Image: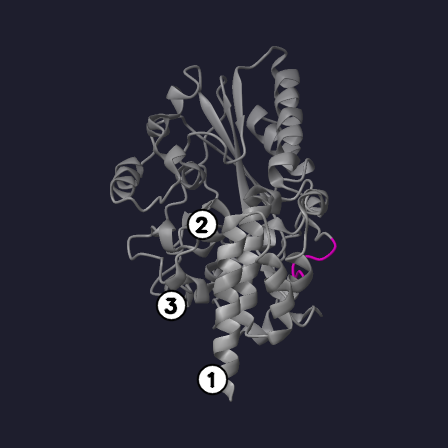
Amino acid sequence: MSLTQAVKNEARRLGFSLAGVTTPEPPLHWPAFQYWLSMGRHGSMEYLADPRRADPRLVLPECRSILMLAMSYPDPGPALQNEFPPVAGRVAAYAWGRDYHLVYPERLKTLVSFIETQVASPVMHRLYTDTGPLLERDLGQRAGLGWIGKNTCLIHPKIGSYFLLAEILLGIHLEPDLPFSADHCGTCTRCITACPTGCILPDRTLDARRCLSFLTIENKNEIPPGLRPHLGNRVFGCDMCQQVCPWNRSTNLGVPVPAYHPESRTGRDQEYDPAFNALPGLPNPDLIAELGLKPKEFNRKFKGNPVLRSKRRGYLRNVAVALGNSGDPAALPALERAFQDNEPLIRGHAVWAMEQIRKDKRNRK
């Protein structure tokens, strides 16, 4: 068995759904990425402008191969059928369980140790779980893990797009895989049509400033008032462009992709890693209860979970908006208490939410 195949087999054993190898050549989509940055579509994510993204060898000069890996997380569809509180929120599926930034590193280190054992010497390397200055999806496509869809996600024909990427830059040669050259989006535009804010652009990029995932996670400031109604009950991320994608319902390349019928989801043949099993209260948190979380309670509840990334002020900002969108007068006492919070960001969005509920109440009379 070749070293490359042995490494892929070990990756599978460690729980990775996909494994592919590519070379450290500059990413094909670097010019398009530069244009995207120049248009300001990255919003406040200034870290994306790191010039090392232009060439993986600027990250690791000794790099000879890049091992691209993917691990599956739950399909968010079944959660729609679960029982949940009367005023419930929605959390993106990747954030139901443990934070992948905590799950991946130990497994990546174990994989490096396996490689070093196989070659009987230390190997120069860098490990990343979307934390490095790399164009991950570009590298993933080159490593044969799928194509970049119209919704900007990397899509694999057998397991769809519900997976998270990681990579190991290696100072040894592994046999590269053929790039995934086919485009299986065809004429489908479901993701573009379904996007709540219309942030998906025709050139397979998106305007992060309007993306609900950006607004509820990366954005540290107020949510623009004109976009708040589009959150619906989402309080952390958004799965919409993936939920409507036919490739998250088809399990075999070459099998006709069925029309989108949310009431007849068939699921995928790919099991997700148990580390991503939903924690209590997820994926549909009780929004009225959430708005009352004190700092220590928030940190304790979301310890080791991606929601912690938004911090309490950002999460309760999102919760307040979702309560305002619910139109439910039962949320008013919780929002009035939130108006007394020490965080101005929470107070400001609580005021907006109360105004929305009272306006809805007047309109129903």
Q: Which secondary structure lies at badge 3?
A: helix
> Any magenta on residue 281?
yes
> Any magenta on residue 67?
no
Q: Nearer the viewer, residue 235 or 207?
A: 235
- Report the residue at 71% width, 51% height from top: 277
Mark toward the viewer: 1 or 2: 1
Q: Which secondary structure lies at badge 2?
A: helix
Q: Main secondary structure of the magenta part?
A: loop
- Report the residue at 47% width, 28% height from top: 66
Q: Which residue is mark 3?
A: 193
- Earlier sequence position, callout 1 versus callout 3: 3
Q: Which secondary structure lies at badge 1?
A: helix
Mark 1–mark 2 distance (CA, rounded to whole Å)? 32 Å
- 358 lies left or right of 295: left
- The magenta stretch is 280-286
Name the amino acid, label 2.
Phe
Q: Nearer the viewer, residue 101 or 78?
A: 101
Quadrant of residue 106 within the rendered picture: top right
- Report the residue at 36% width, 25% height from top: 52
- Earlier sequence position, callout 1 versus callout 2: 2
Percent across and percent down for residue 93 are 60, 55
Mark 3–mark 2 distance (CA, rounded to whole Å)? 19 Å
Name the amino acid, label 3.
Thr
